[in-house]
Amino acid sequence: MQIIKAENISKTYGSKKNAKQYRALKSISFEVNEGEFIGVMGASGSGKTTLLNILGSIDKPTSGKFIMDGHDIATLNKNQLAKHRMENIGFIFQDYNLLETMTLKENIILPLALRGIKANVMEEKLFNFARDLGIMEVLDKYPYEVSGGEQQRAAACRALITNPKMILADEPTGNLDSKSGKELLNLLTFINKEYKATILLVTHDVFAASYCQKIMFIRDGEIHNELYAGDNKKQFFDAIIDVMSVIGGEEK
Ligand SMILES: Nc1ncnc2c1ncn2[C@@H]1O[C@H](COP(=O)(O)OP(=O)(O)OP(=O)(O)O)[C@@H](O)[C@H]1O
């Protein structure tokens, strides 16, 4: 089932009166189906974050249509948008975005607490996900007391706990060492397979991208091309490197 349909989406920063107008996205069209694990790659400044902000309904396109789960997002008012974001989208960021004054457990259940879910229901969900994500032992610790990998797993747990329609991950391995990065990528793969979560992963890292089923390459605000993973991971990895060497942007 189709979860996202983006039709001719453009994003221009700066007002019309402003001579410094910049077209960050130029009439992009694509679709995302339920359960897909998609990578978004491109050089710095190519428009990846702009695209992710629109997909996350944090920002609106200047023109074009963005349909999620059958709803035209442009028609939602401010309150409906906030509700849509909270219920349908899970975010995972490079710097984890956990609240330092709360334990991991409190951070994870915050989205449920904000929705007034009963304590016993929250705990059940929490323990199910925390067990799968391997952070049961550190739930009562504060973010500064645990490793980056554990913080990111807690962030992934927080993103999952509302059963969102889509998870948006912006460079989630960017601050992790290679072992923790690999663990997180295995976890995203598990989340994708086990929970049928639809995941969009923005990354500069070819290794991270090679975990995806499909890569969308952005160049100067346009879709340069798309690559699908076949059965051969090494071939997919090499093909990603080839495209990145043409469009630029691999930082690792
Ligand atoms: N709020 C803004 N106002 C003006 N220009 C902006 C704004 N946000 C982004 N841009 C410009 O739009 C273009 C695309 O930016 P975007 O952040 O989407 O790129 P990116 O591919 O995510 O880059 P990076 O990999 O460095 O994060 C850039 O040229 C950027 O300078």
Image (tube, rainbow, N blue to C red):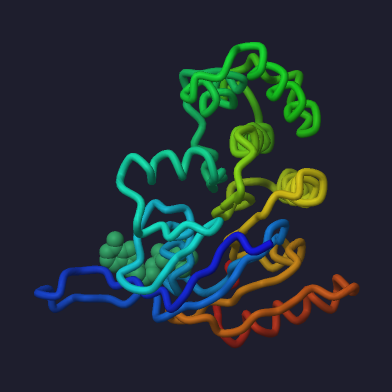
Q: Nearer the viewer, residue 185 or 106?
A: 106
Above or below, 188 relative to 87: below
Q: Quadrant of the N terminus?
A: bottom right
Instruction: Please tell me which residue is depicted at 52% across the width and 43% down the height of the picture.
Output: 95
Left or right, residue 178 beside residue 219: right
Q: Is residue 96 visible?
A: yes
Q: Quadrant of the C terminus?
A: bottom right
Instruction: Please tell me which residue is depicted at 45% across the width and 65% down the height of the picture.
Output: 66
Q: Residue furthest left?
A: 17
- The part of the image, by quadrant, that contains residue 103 is top right
Left or right, residue 219 beside residue 150: left
- The part of the image, by quadrant, that contains residue 25 is bottom left
Residue 42 picture location, percent across and down: 54, 74
- Quadrant location, ligand no. 1: bottom left
Left or right, residue 217 beside residue 76: right
Q: Nearer the viewer, residue 233 or 88?
A: 88
Q: Residue furthest right?
A: 231
Number of residue marks: 0
Instruction: Please tell me which residue is depicted at 43% across the width and 39% down the height of the picture.
Output: 83
Q: Is residue 179 visible?
A: no
Above or below, 36 relative to 149: below
Instruction: Please tell me which residue is depicted at 73% across the width and 63% down the height of the picture.
Output: 212
Residue 11 picture location, percent across and down: 34, 71
Residue 245 picture location, percent across and down: 62, 84
Residue 219 picture location, percent across and down: 49, 81
Q: Residue furthest bottom?
A: 246
